Image: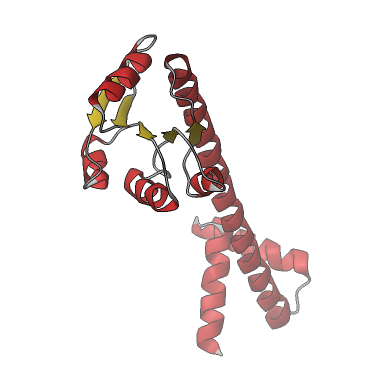
């Protein structure tokens, strides 16, 4: 059985905090922690280390969104922001800052759970995309290194490209290393010999 999610609710108003907790616990089992003070918010959130952060703000500004974003670690966990009203461009700024959900005038009992679910799904999607992007960048960099090492072998030994790659691959297999690591070592050695 899965552990219940730990959720931090950032809400200074005790009645609204209770409303959010009740909306969350109506249909699901969550461990909910309420943080009433925004002072030292990052430290308070780190102490709880929640799976999700829900924040209720009546009238946000870019500064408040930036402060909350820095404090809540939106790249580490889903963060949903409920606001009463929103100025032009704030929703875009919130999403660009990494928040998983920005909900205007949407703090109703029936919407809290679906917004939470959507924030979690969006966060997971974005995390997968960040991972895939990092892996793709790493693969491209490795490809560049391998191509450069092949070029060095082609010039130094007069080999065609496919034989230069085969030599890199054979050397990697003999040494129990990755082709990219052997290619990097060859490039480093060539720099030393220049």
- Locate the C terminus by quadrant: bottom right
Say if residue 39 shows up in the picture: yes
Percent across and percent down for residue 38 are 25, 43
**Residue occupying the point 61% across, 68% down:** 145
Tell me: residue 183, above or below residue 108.
Answer: below
In-image side of 172 versus 111 (left or right): right
Res 21 → quadrant: top left
Tell me: residue 29, above or below residue 87.
Answer: above
In-image side of 174 versus 3 (left or right): right
Say if residue 4 shows up in the picture: no
**Residue occupying the point 66% across, 72% down:** 148
Q: Nearer the viewer, residue 100 or 180?
A: 100
**Residue occupying the point 54% across, 52% down:** 134
In-image side of 78 versus 92 (left or right): left
Q: Which residue is situated farthest in the right direction here?
A: 160
Q: Which residue is situated farthest in the top direction here?
A: 27
Q: Nearer the viewer, residue 59 or 176?
A: 59
Tell me: residue 128, above or below residue 40.
Answer: above
**Residue occupying the point 58% across, 50% down:** 133
Chosen colour scheme: secondary structure
- Locate the N terminus by quadrant: top left
Percent across and percent down for residue 123 are 49, 36
Tell me: residue 135, above or below residue 10.
Answer: below
Res 165 → quadrant: bottom right
In-image side of 164 versus 4 (left or right): right
Q: Which residue is situated farthest in the bottom direction here?
A: 194
Percent across and percent down for residue 158 are 75, 79
Tag count in the figure? 0
Percent across and percent down for residue 6 are 30, 26
């Amino acid at each position: 059985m899965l552990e219940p999610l730990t959720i931090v609710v950032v809400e200074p108003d005790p009645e609204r905090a209770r409303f959010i907790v009740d909306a969350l616990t109506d249909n699901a089992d969550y461990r909910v922690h309420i943080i009433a003070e925004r002072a030292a918010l990052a430290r308070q959130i780190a102490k709880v280390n929640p799976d999700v952060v829900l924040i209720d703000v009546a009238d946000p500004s870019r500064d408040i969104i930036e402060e909350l974003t820095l404090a809540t670690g939106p790249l580490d966990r889903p963060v949903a922001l409920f606001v009463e009203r929103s100025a032009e461009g704030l929703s875009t700024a919130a999403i660009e800052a990494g928040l998983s959900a920005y909900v205007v005038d949407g703090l109703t009992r029936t919407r809290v759970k679906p917004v939470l679910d959507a924030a979690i799904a969006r966060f997971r999607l974005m995390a997968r995309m960040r991972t895939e992007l990092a892996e793709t960048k790493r693969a491209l960099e490795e490809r560049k290194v391998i191509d450069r090492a092949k070029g060095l072998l082609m010039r130094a030994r007069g080999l065609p490209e496919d034989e230069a790659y085969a030599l890199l691959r054979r050397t990697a297999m003999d040494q129990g290393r990755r082709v990219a690591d052997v290619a990097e070592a060859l490039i480093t050695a060539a720099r030393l010999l220049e």
